[in-house]
Image (cartoon, rainbow, N blue to C red):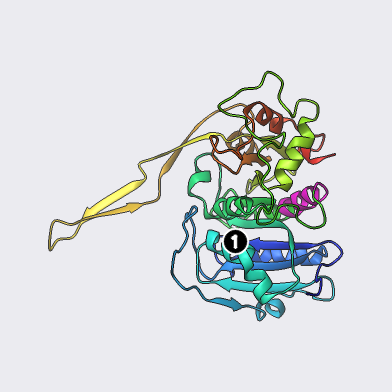
Amino acid sequence: MVDQTPEGGWLLLTNDDGIEAPGFRMLAQALNKAGHSIIAFAPSENNSAAGMRINLMKPMKLRPRHDLIPTWGLDESKAEVRLFELDGTPCDTMIVALDGGIQHVAPGVVPRLVVSGVNLGPNMSQDSYHSGTMGAAREAGLYGMPALASSLASFELDGMEGAVKATVDLIEVALKALPHTPENLRRPHVDVSASHLTRWPEIPATPAWEDDPKGALRTAFRHGELMLNLNVPPVWDGSVTTTRLGMRWYRNAVSFGSIEEDETALFTIGGATIDHSPVHQSDCDAVDSGHASVSCLPVWPQTHPLALDDGLLKWVLESSEGGYPAWLHA
């Protein structure tokens, strides 16, 4: 197999709004302009709020969308471009791509980082459980890939240019913390003794990561145990803040009616009012203040052997001078 790795490596792109969504197009254009080679495995249609839903035992068509390269004005002399759409969910795109699909349709292409977005709409607080954008990034992490999710914290397109810029900036910061090729793709070696991992239910008096917590977090990111989640306000002041998940409450989310012919009730979820409970250093509070929020989130459930150590997690809130997580900088 011929190595198809360009100098800066490949970025694997996906989203939940569908391959022709404006945020996805604008991100592809910006990355191409910046000289990043991209391969896209994106849903063929909108799959918002799909969470981590997957299709089992259902054939899904994967189609090349090279027609979008000239339509979007992508310049293949600047960086390589491969675009594909899948008739599946965001998580399906990552499973297909990382479990053999890329090698089937683009032999020799090995992604360095997964980027999911840019989503139209916020993905903060409890959205992390429902979001297809975040679900795709988390699925990539399950396969051992470093990943980030990105969202414009608005359902209007105003501000998408800023969200795309913030995403490209974060990608370039993240790439500096990553090797040229992934270390843990498809998890060929599982080391449950790695310093960043939990020892639960035991709680060691001296954690294995104590001498180098930032290095432990970089390893967690490189191995797919830690992901990044970016939210950018529609009116962005240009600053970045390292955050935790905040608290948002969706009230009166259900509207209902009935069908006259029988007693069947109709329920529609959407259009909720949002209550926000202030939380120190949270994504919700940062976005409300005009800052881009970068949250560092564990990929695995907290009682899983590959979950991050509880004590180590406090270090994800330490920020660098530029506002990004301090552990991203060696």
Query: Does residue 263 sit above or below 282 in this rendering?
Result: below
Residue placed at 54% from the left, 60% from the top?
90
Residue 267 in percent (x, y) is at 28, 53
Query: Where on the picture, by quarter, is residue 217?
Result: top right
Among all residues in the image, which is located at the extreme right?
7
Q: Nearer the viewer, residue 220 or 288?
A: 220
Question: Which residue carries the number 1 mark?
Answer: 94
Residue 70 falls left or right of residue 251: right
Q: Is residue 271 above or below residue 37?
A: above
Pick the quarter of the image with the C terminus. top right
Q: Relative to the observer, which residue lies in front, 198 or 158?
A: 198
Badge 1 amino acid: Met
Residue visible at 47% across and 60% down?
54
Q: Main secondary structure of the magenta part?
A: helix
Residue 80 lies, in percent from the top left, at 78, 72
- Residue 241, can we see it? yes
Q: Which residues are magenta?
A: 166-177
